[in-house]
Each structure stands twice: as C-alpha cells, then as structure tokens.
Image (cartoon, rainbow, N blue to C red):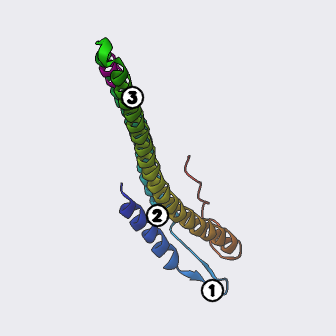
Amino acid sequence: MNRMNLIILMDRLEDLIQSAPMIPFSGKGLVDVEEVMGLLEKIRAAIPDEIRQAEAISGERDRFLEESRAQAERIILQAEEYAARLVADSEIVKKSQEEGRRIIQEARRKSRELEQNAQKYASDILANLQKALERTLQVVERGRREVDDSLAAQSTGSEAAPFESAPKAQSPPR
C-alpha cells in the first residue's frame, strides 16, 4: 500500500471522527468503533511497506558500497600489476617506478572518490526515506491521537449517557 492510500485512510478516519453525532452539552461525539478499528487495521497494514522499503534501501546501500570497494581494489591491483610490468627493463626502472606510483596514486584517488560518492548516494537515499517515514509517522500519530480522543470522549460520555450497556472496544493485538 502506498503513501497516498495511507493518507486516504487517515482522511477517512478523520472524516469519521468529524462527522460523528455529538452528545448534547458534552462536546463529545459517538463513532462506530468497528469502523474505526477497521480503518486502524488498514493503516497498520500500510505502514510495513515503508519499513520494508527502508530495509531494501539499506541492503542496496550495502551492496553498492561493497561493489564500489571491490572495483576500487581491482583498480589498485591492475595499477600495481601495470607498475610491475613497467619495471622489467633496468634502463627505464626510474621512469617506470615514477609512472607506477602516479598510476597507483590515481587509482587510490579514484577509489576514494568512488567510496565517497557511494556514501553520499546512500546518505541521500536514507535521508529521503527518513523524511518519508517521519511524515508517515506524523500522519499515524495524528490519527491515533484523534482515535484515542474519540474513544476517551465515548467512554466519558457513556457514563452520563443512556448507552451504558454498549461493550467497550478492545485494541487489536500489535
């Protein structure tokens, strides 16, 4: 279930609470507990998709970093092998060593750059996901507060109202 479905469910819950019939002189309203609980179950079902997405992105980040490190190691190994081949002739040893060091330094620089880019990419992805999860959590918390307020209003109102025989709603297992 995507973020829009979660928002739609939260909007339905909010509409249900706002359109609840009011108990005169109490400022309290009555809501259909079964309907509220059904919406809450759907909301709970929508949340794990975000969490699974976070886990997948974290795994992708680890895989991306590992591939970057492996590629960097291959570049360094190739540079060292190339440098060793350049040293074969004694007359060009000095130039070969200098060229080899330059190639190795360049390979190390590229390796650092690859790793930095991989870290930045992973950080950006996780930051975006964190923002999405925080927004989702805010929506859920707001909905939860509204439901809790509504339930509290019902239980307070039911003590003074003639509906005392109505069963109290139980929270579903988490």
Is residue 103 or residue 121 the one in the foreground? 103
Is residue 99 or residue 26 the one in the foreground? 99
Say if 88 sits above or below 12 in the image.
Answer: above
In the image, 115: left or right of 147? left
Q: Which residue is mark 1?
A: 24
Q: Which residue is mark 2?
A: 35
Q: Residues within 10 Å of mark 1 (few under 14, many from 20)?
A: few
Where is residue 113 drawn, in percent x and y?
Answer: 41, 42
Q: Quadrant of the N terminus?
A: bottom left
Give the label, 2 or 1, closer to the camera: 2
Question: For the residues marked 2 and 1, what is the alpha-carbon distance in whole angstroms?
Answer: 23 Å
- Locate residue 12: give its quadrant: bottom left
Say if 123 sits above or below 25 in the image.
Answer: above
Q: Residues within 10 Å of mark 2 (few under 14, many from 20)?
A: few
Question: For the residues marked 3 and 1, what is the alpha-carbon distance in whole angstroms?
Answer: 82 Å
Helix, strand or loop under label 1:
loop
Question: For the residues marked 3 and 2, what is the alpha-carbon distance in whole angstroms?
Answer: 67 Å
**Stretch in magenta:** 79-84
* 163 is within the stretch colored magenta: no
Three-letter amino acid code of the residue under disc 1: Pro
Where is residue 11 drawn, in percent x and y?
Answer: 44, 71
Where is residue 72 drawn, in percent x and y?
Answer: 37, 31
Note whether residue 70 is visible.
no
